[in-house]
Image (spheres, helix red, strand yellow):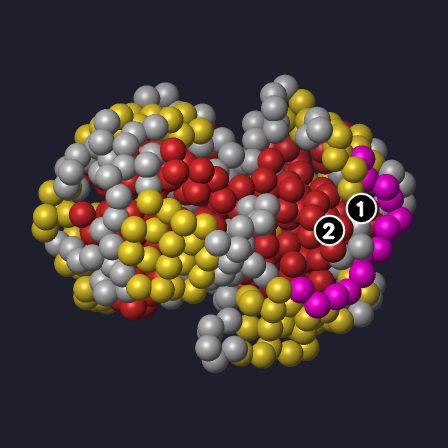
Amino acid sequence: MKSVKINPMTLEGEINIPPSKSMSHRAIICASLSRGESLIHNISYSDDIIATIEGMKALGVEVLEEILDQDTGTYSLRIKGVEEFKLQSDSVNCKESGSTIRFLIPILMLAGEKFNITGEGRLVERPLDTYYRIFDQQGIKYANTGGILPLEIEGCLKPGTFSIEGNISSQFITGLLFTLPLLDGDSRIVVTESELESKGYVDLTIDILRKFGIEIENRDYKEFFIKGNQSYVSREYKVEGDYSQGAFWIVAGLLDGKIVCNDLEKSSLQGDKEVVEIVERMGGNISVSEDSITVEKSETRGTVIDASQCPDIIPVLSVLAALSEGETRVINGKRLRIKESDRITSTRTELEKLGADIREEGDGLVIVGKPMLEGGAVLDSWNDHRIAMAMGVASIRCKKPVEITNSGSVSKSYPHFWEDFKKLGGVVDERNMG
């Protein structure tokens, strides 16, 4: 297990933001479901992306070529899509990737064969009830162990009407949107009980599906109409930079320094682009151009942050709140409790260790800002990449050094985070604890 010890230091400079993990999953899947070859540029081999690639290989997809860009450290992948839906392996390990498991379950069912889904860490117990209800309705055989992985599935999805609660992960809707256009018949997804959360992620899915030849009709996020017997069209595609990763450097620059974040598209549909609006509302000095964002040290103030549309950036925004004047309230954070960690509790626990004034309130947080945090603590990443990175950013405004255990958890989404931290001037002592 790795740990890092960080001496508080101003971060300044220019950084290339990693490719969007959300878009990388989607681009790889769309290319995999296309006949012929697609070329997907700007892929970073994080643990989650590797899990999706391996999952699609189980369906017969081939990665014909991997081309390394020496300047960025990212890859271009030449992907040969599925010719016939036939499983090459009867077991798929989704590692710890929630996106992988929820996207791939309906896709793998296109083969109509029996297969097993396994996972690791918290993924083993993350909920899949939405799919289980669909399986029950359609008479699809499945078995699990007390509601947790491994999961055995046998059967094909049939076209029809699928009712999905609006307050659960949009990943279930995306998994169906990938699959239903390929079925022999039209389908509808009806959003029930509450307004759809994480609309931005559904927008990403519909947009990239259109670019690969699939049309989805979005009826005001209350219903999605999917025509059957469509075909994916292979193409060349470049993955854009990731706002959820850029948020760490945006907050770092606001806390102390000046940072230019490259490869963040102003026109992006990513839900986590909301970080820009939130930072502006908090009084941050932020300048947005067509493909980059510049931030400078700012005297920020508290606000109300609705976590329902941007759950992945809440840990680092909580760091900013802990160092902003006045009170910040994080609301509607129910889904934060079923991420890689319970991010309401993990964020509160680790910021408390640094001396922050923070408490849990329902499925949210109440944070009263301070000019500085004490530091001098040993923090736990909770094996959660976003907690590890957020606490790294928090160290910038601590009086004493900070140690973070299991710091290697960043490999889930941003393997080179600590290297980039050092490139911007961070003083990081990386250790292997054995």
Residue 61 versus residue 247 in the image, above or below: below
Q: 417 or 247, which lies in front?
A: 247
Quick one: label 2 or label 1, which is nearer the N terminus?
A: 2
Residue drawn at x 67%, y 73% as measured from the top left = 78
Looking at the image, residue 157 sits to the left or right of residue 289; the answer is right
Determine the secondary structure under disc 1.
loop
Looking at the image, residue 257 sits to the left or right of residue 152; the answer is left
- Highlighted range, magenta: 225-237
Residue drawn at x 86%, y 50% as measured from the top left = 230
Image coordinates for residue 38, horizontal then vertical, percent: 72, 69
Measured in 3D between alpha carbons, the distance from the residue under mark 2 to the one under mark 1, in whole angstroms, is 7 Å
Residue 28 versus residue 336 in the image, above or below: below
Determine the secondary structure under disc 2.
helix
Image coordinates for residue 97, horizontal then vertical, percent: 51, 51
Q: Is residue 235 magenta?
A: yes
Q: Are marks 2 and 1 in contact (CB under 8 Å)?
A: yes
* Quadrant of the image containing the N terminus: bottom left
Crowd rating for badge 2 (residues with CA inside 10 Å; few <14, some 14–19, many 20+): many
Q: Is residue 124 visible?
A: no
Looking at the image, residue 130 sits to the left or right of residue 72; the answer is right
Kind of residue at disc 2: Leu
Looking at the image, residue 82 sits to the left or right of residue 28; the answer is right
Image coordinates for residue 222, horizontal then vertical, percent: 70, 26
The residue identified by callout 2 is: 209
Image coordinates for residue 140, horizontal then vertical, percent: 76, 39
Residue 290 versus residue 141 in the image, above or below: below
The residue identified by callout 1 is: 215
